[in-house]
Amino acid sequence: MRQDTVTQETFEAPAGKSRLLSRLYRDIGLAAVAIELDLLAEPLEIELEDAIERGARYIAPFPLALAS
């Protein structure tokens, strides 16, 4: 049986590109759900609107107007 040893360095290493990809996937997912549920006209939190706008750039062929 293989036993993995975890060192302190493993936990302290910076996430690097994986954190960027994680945020990108989250933004795209939020945009997809917002588009599908037609939530773009609803007033949302500023941070959520920004995330949806960033994600929509990757999945929508045209700019989407978000409520502000």
Image (spheres, helix red, strand yellow):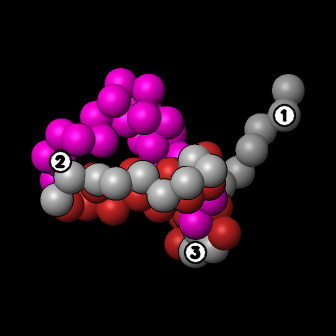
Amino acid type of disc 2? Leu
Disc 2/disc 3 C-alpha distance (Å): 31 Å
Screen quadrant of the N terminus: top right
* Circle nearer the N terminus (2, 3): 3
Asked if disc 1 and disc 2 are in contact, CB closer than 8 Å, the reply is: no
Q: Give the magenta part as a residue range.
A: 20-45
On the image, numbered disc 3 is attached to which residue?
14
Crowding near the residue tagged with mark 3, few <14, some 14–19, many ≥20 C-alpha atoms within 10 Å: few
What is the tally of numbered marks visible in this picture?
3
Q: For this rendering, which residue is in front, 12 or 58?
A: 58
Q: In this rendering, is residue 3 above or below 13? A: above
Q: Are marks 1 and 3 in contact (CB under 8 Å)?
A: no
Q: Which residue is mark 2?
A: 44
Tag 1 secondary structure: loop
Label 3 sits on a secondary structure element that is: loop
Of marks 1 and 3, the one in the foreground: 3
Q: Nearer the viewer, residue 12 or 2?
A: 12
Task: Describe residue 14's horizontal placement relative to residue 2 as left or right.
Answer: left
Residue at point 17%, 47% (across, down): 44
Instruction: Tell me the amino acid under the disc marked 3.
Output: Pro
Query: Residue 68: x, y in percent?
Result: 16, 59
